[in-house]
Image (cartoon, coloured by chain):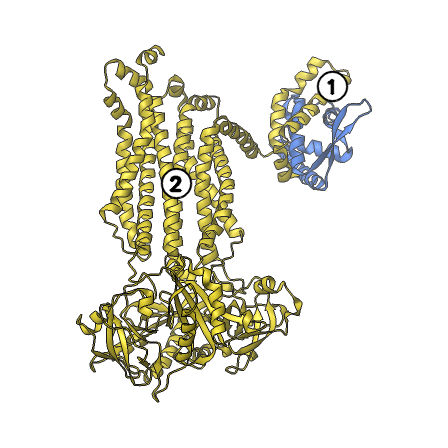
Chain colours: A yellow, B blue
């Protein structure tokens, strides 16, 4: 009974009324049957309509019934004006969908907790301060010996877990010919237990699997990998996989949905930290440290204690530092250890995309506000047409709250329809955006399950939208005073004023969106068209490993073999390709001066590398076959770039001069000077770079064997990837034990550098167009309405001789003042917002004339186009017909 | 004594009491019973019994059911629920307390 039956009765209201009526009639009939006079019986019964209404109200929820009635009425209103309603719903749907999609992305990348026990107790340990390059930065990499000391020091208050950066590894389940790539993480054996994870099959790693360096060749697979690589084969346990020179036994599969701790990467294989070759080194920071606080332990004391332990470790280690100034060492030691919440995991993707996603979220929120203003204006204009209806309702006793409810229910219909369509849009668009983040060989994988958080967000958004665009028209509509409304309306300008305020707000938001989109587009354009100083055209990069390190002479033989193949123009060797993100650096000293405070960057290349990359030479010569670099205090030769010459030689020509790497006193004679080319990424200022020969000489005069390198191949055909498979085979054929582990074109590496910027520019421009269209439609609607409302006035003016220009000015003047006001406000907002976006911008100045002029002119142009139709309409008014209408 | 609204405030009590004695009555029968037992003293606008019945039905004190009578007409009959019995006890004792108090006042004044 009670509430449920009353709710149910709302939806069977007619039947309820019939039943009550039947019962009441039965009463009178019974009386007549008993022999009473029909008239007397009816009189004694009393007014049956009142009884029925009373009973009906008792037996259903009155407010719900009224909402039901409003919903039906509202739906009819919307259906009556199909075109305007569809426009309103579609523009709202686009905006709501975009907001929901942005939230899905933000949720998946940044907010959603890892699928582990008590994720809110997880923290990541990092160091904040100045780096060796003197710039403020934060580092979350740690050396294992330091990790061990910290774990021991804090074990009563927290558990520390080492988890390496996810890396792609070459691995094989059979022979070298069947190498494949998989994502690997080295993890502390106790990680699984500490995170409350269970095996789906076999067993997980424990602390006993992580005791002795190199002693635990065991591996655990993720459920995802087990599923898509092995089809959930239960016989996987006990199989072996080879990575490098180690053979690992698979002991288990971890339960769904845990796939590592880095949102954006799905880890395939977990192996113990002890299997990492750097595990005993104090100078290699290769893993993150996750901290799980024990219950009731505060962050602050743990942080202080870890800081002290870490600092003591580094101070001890710094005693062995050579070739650095005291100041550089102090700066390094002063880095502060910080615990940061890591419930959602930690990944590079988060670092790279937090800013862009938040910026994008802001843009779509603005678009949503513009769409809301549009619908509000629409509703406001409709409310004008319904003034008499409202007045009538008030006259026969409708309360104000009831009228507000009625209009809000109509808004809710629009919001509901828009949300439903928006959900479809979000469902499609979020994976679309993720699919665009696809650097070669490393596409982002991010789970986008629509969970209760997304659903909650969408519902909250729908409600908020209903109130944002519905409340003002609802209040306005309900505030009618019947007397004046039925007489023909009160101040007709007040409604227009409200609409004009909305127009100003719309234009301001629209300007902001255009302005920001312009900044992103300029950033993307400038980064993509940055002069490189080399030619990436037709360059194929073969990252190659040899089973055992081989003499560089052997590597040269492989290069010679490639050179002899058809379709190959040039071949050179280098330690790594340009722009692949890696760096190798050292402090240097010139003429025995103290060590530099600026790091110099190194790259080893073979003779002919500059030629192959088409880097011109400013002075000096290329390396000769006999030139070598040096590792143990010997002498070698180097070719440096212009920034290097400026930085260390005061801008003089460095050819013929000497410098030394301070670490081991390796001396280098500069034999050439080349222009600047980007080193590891496109964004940073050019680094001082020294190129040294691929041939390295030991102290005892022998060539140092090399285990991996990159063949840089310039093909003669226009699509270098056509040769990828062929060259892959030829490398293996040229020399047994040589294997290509990765193939990419130089162009792909360059494009990968600008993915984020291009994506942001593309999305921002898309929303700029949407914002522009919405604002244009909004302006058109308001002008059109105002012409309609003032047609009598215009007719009179024309009759007494007003000129066309005068009429046009009169019709559009107010609105255009609002457009200008809005644009000015948008400009102010934009300039204020730029400060928060600086890290996302490259090579653009917010106060550039073009950056400011483009959005301004675009908005004015759109405003003119929007005004055209209403003005023509105003001029076509026939004064005679208009005056006769009265 | 006036025949009109003397039922004010005590209609629920009377309906519950009658239904406790004779279950499964329709509205007209309940009203006739009140009139007959009170020797025509208690008599209201006959229709006003229905909102009261529907209110008590919503409160869960009585439940209703449609039946078809021998004459072929449908009638909605009512009977007491468990919580209706409790309500009856409560109302009855409250009524007794009030009337005895009123009687005392009438005697003493």
- Residue at x-position 67% and y-position 18%: A44
Please, is residue A330 above or below residue A15 in the view? below
At 25% from the left and 52% from the top, the residue drawn is A845
Find residue A481 and report its horizontal and vertical position in percent.
39, 23
Q: Chain of mark 1?
A: A
Q: Earlier in the sequence, mark 1 or mark 2?
A: 1
Q: Is residue A666 above or below residue A93?
A: below
* Horizontal side, residue B95 vs residue B33: left or right: left
In the image, residue A439 lies at what x, y percent? 43, 60
Q: Which residue is mark 2?
A: A770
**Residue sitting nearer the eye, A97 or B70:** A97
Q: Crowding at label 2, few (<14), some or many (≥20) Cα neighbours within 10 Å?
A: many
Who is closer to the viewer here, A188 or A859? A859
Q: Secondary structure at mark 1?
A: helix
Q: Is residue A257 visible?
A: yes
Q: Nearer the viewer, residue A873 or A337?
A: A873
Residue A851's place in the image compared with A226, above or below, is above
Which residue lies most toward the bottom here?
A700
| Same-chain check, marks 1 and 2 | yes
Residue at 26% x, 47% y: name it: A851
Quadrant showing the C terminus of chain A = top left
> Circle 1 sits on which residue?
A29
Q: Residue A765's x, y, as percent?
A: 36, 45
């Amino acid at each position: 009974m009670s509430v449920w039956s009353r709710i149910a009765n709302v939806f069977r209201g007619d039947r309820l009324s019939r039943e009550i009526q039947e019962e009441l009639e039965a009463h009178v009939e019974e009386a007549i049957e008993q022999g009473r006079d029909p008239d007397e019986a009816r009189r004694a019964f009393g007014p049956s309509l009142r009884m029925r209404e009373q009973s009906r109200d008792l037996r259903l929820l009155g407010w719900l019934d009224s909402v039901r009635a409003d919903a039906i009425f509202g739906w009819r209103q919307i259906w009556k004006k199909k075109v305007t309603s569809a426009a309103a719903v579609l523009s709202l749907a686009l905006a709501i969908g975009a907001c929901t999609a942005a939230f899905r992305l933000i949720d998946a990348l940044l907010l959603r907790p890892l699928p582990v026990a008590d994720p809110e107790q997880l923290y990541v340990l990092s160091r904040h301060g100045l780096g060796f390059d003197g710039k403020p930065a934060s580092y979350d990499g740690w050396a294992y010996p330091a990790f061990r000391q910290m774990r021991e020091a804090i074990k009563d208050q927290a558990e520390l877990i080492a988890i390496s950066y996810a890396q792609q590894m070459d691995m094989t389940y059979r022979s070298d010919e069947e190498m494949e790539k998989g994502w690997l993480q080295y993890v502390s054996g106790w990680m699984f237990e500490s995170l409350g994870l269970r095996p789906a099959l076999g067993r997980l790693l424990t602390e006993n699997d992580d005791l002795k360096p190199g002693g635990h060749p065991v591996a655990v697979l993720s459920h995802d990998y087990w599923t898509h690589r092995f089809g959930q084969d239960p016989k996987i346990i006990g199989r072996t996989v080879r990575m490098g020179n180690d053979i690992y036994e698979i002991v288990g599969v971890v339960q769904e949905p845990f796939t590592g701790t880095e949102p954006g990467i799905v880890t395939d294989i977990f192996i113990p930290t002890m299997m990492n070759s750097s595990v005993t080194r104090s100078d290699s920071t290769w893993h993150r440290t996750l901290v799980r606080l024990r219950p009731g332990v505060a962050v602050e004391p743990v942080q202080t204690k870890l800081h002290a332990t870490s600092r003591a470790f580094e101070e001890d280690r710094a005693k062995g530092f050579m070739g650095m100034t005291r100041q550089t060492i102090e700066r390094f030691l002063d880095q502060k250890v910080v615990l940061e919440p890591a419930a959602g995991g930690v990944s590079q993707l988060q670092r790279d995309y937090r800013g862009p996603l938040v910026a994008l979220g802001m843009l779509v929120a603005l678009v949503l506000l513009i769409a809301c203003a549009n619908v509000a204006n629409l509703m406001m204009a409709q409310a004008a047409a319904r003034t008499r209806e409202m007045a009538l309702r008030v006259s026969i006793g409708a309360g104000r709250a009831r009228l507000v409810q009625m209009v809000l229910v109509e808004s809710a219909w629009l919001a509901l329809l828009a949300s439903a369509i928006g959900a479809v849009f979000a469902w499609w668009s979020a994976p679309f955006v993720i699919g665009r983040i696809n650097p070669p060989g490393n596409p982002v994988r991010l789970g986008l399950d629509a969970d209760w958080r997304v659903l909650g967000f969408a519902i909250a958004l729908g409600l908020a939208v209903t109130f944002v665009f519905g409340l003002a028209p609802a209040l306005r509509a309900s505030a009618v005073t019947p007397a004046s409304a039925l007489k023909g309306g009160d101040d007709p300008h007040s409604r227009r004023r409200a609409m004009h305020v909305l127009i100003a707000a719309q234009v301001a938001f629209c300007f902001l969106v255009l302005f920001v989109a312009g900044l992103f587009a300029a950033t993307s354009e400038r980064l993509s068209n940055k002069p490189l100083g080399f030619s990436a055209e037709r360059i194929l990069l073969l990252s190659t490993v040899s089973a055992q390190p081989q003499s560089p002479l052997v590597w040269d033989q492989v290069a010679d073999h490639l050179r002899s193949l058809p379709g190959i123009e040039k071949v050179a060797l280098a330690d790594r390709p340009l722009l692949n993100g890696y760096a190798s650096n050292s402090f240097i000293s010139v003429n025995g001066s103290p060590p530099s405070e600026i790091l110099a960057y190194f790259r080893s290349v073979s003779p002919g590398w500059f030629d192959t990359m088409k880097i011109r030479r400013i002075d000096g010569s290329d390396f000769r076959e006999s030139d070598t670099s040096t590792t143990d205090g010997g002498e070698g030769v180097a070719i440096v770039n212009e920034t290097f010459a400026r930085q260390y030689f005061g801008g003089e020509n460095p050819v013929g001069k000497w410098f030394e790497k301070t670490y081991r006193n390796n001396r280098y004679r500069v034999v050439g000077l080349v222009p600047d080319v980007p080193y590891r990424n496109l964004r940073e200022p050019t680094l001082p770079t020294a190129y040294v020969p691929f041939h390295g000489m030991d102290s005892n005069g022998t060539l140092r064997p090399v285990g991996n390198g990159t063949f840089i191949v310039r093909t003669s055909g226009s699509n270098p990837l056509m040769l990828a498979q062929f060259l892959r085979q030829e490398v293996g054929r040229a020399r047994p034990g040589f294997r290509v582990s990765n193939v990419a074109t130089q162009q792909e590496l360059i494009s990968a550098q600008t993915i984020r910027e291009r994506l942001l520019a593309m999305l921002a421009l898309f929303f700029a167009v949407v914002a522009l269209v919405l604002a244009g439609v909004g302006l058109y609607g308001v002008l059109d309405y105002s012409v309609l409302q003032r047609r009598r006035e215009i007719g009179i003016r024309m009759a007494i001789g007003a000129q066309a220009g005068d009429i046009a000015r009169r019709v559009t003047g107010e609105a255009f003042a609002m457009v200008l006001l809005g644009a000015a406000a948008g400009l102010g907002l934009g300039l204020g917002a730029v400060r928060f976006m600086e890290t996302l911008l490259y090579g653009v100045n917010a106060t550039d004339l073009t950056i400011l002029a483009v959005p301004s002119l675009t908005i004015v142009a759109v405003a003119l186009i929007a005004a055209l139709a209403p003005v023509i309409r105003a001029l076509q008014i026939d004064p005679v017909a208009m005056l006769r209408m009265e | 004594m006036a025949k009109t609204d003397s039922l004010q405030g005590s209609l629920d009590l009377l309906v519950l009491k009658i239904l406790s004695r004779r279950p499964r009555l329709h509205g007209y029968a309940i009203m006739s019973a009140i009139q007959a037992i009170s020797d025509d003293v208690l008599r209201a606008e006959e229709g006003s019994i229905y909102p009261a019945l529907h209110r008590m039905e919503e409160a869960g004190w009585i439940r209703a059911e449609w039946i078809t009578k021998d004459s072929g007409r449908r009638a909605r009959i009512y009977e007491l629920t468990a919580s209706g019995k409790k309500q009856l006890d409560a109302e009855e004792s409250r009524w007794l307390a009030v009337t005895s108090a009123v009687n005392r006042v009438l005697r003493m004044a």
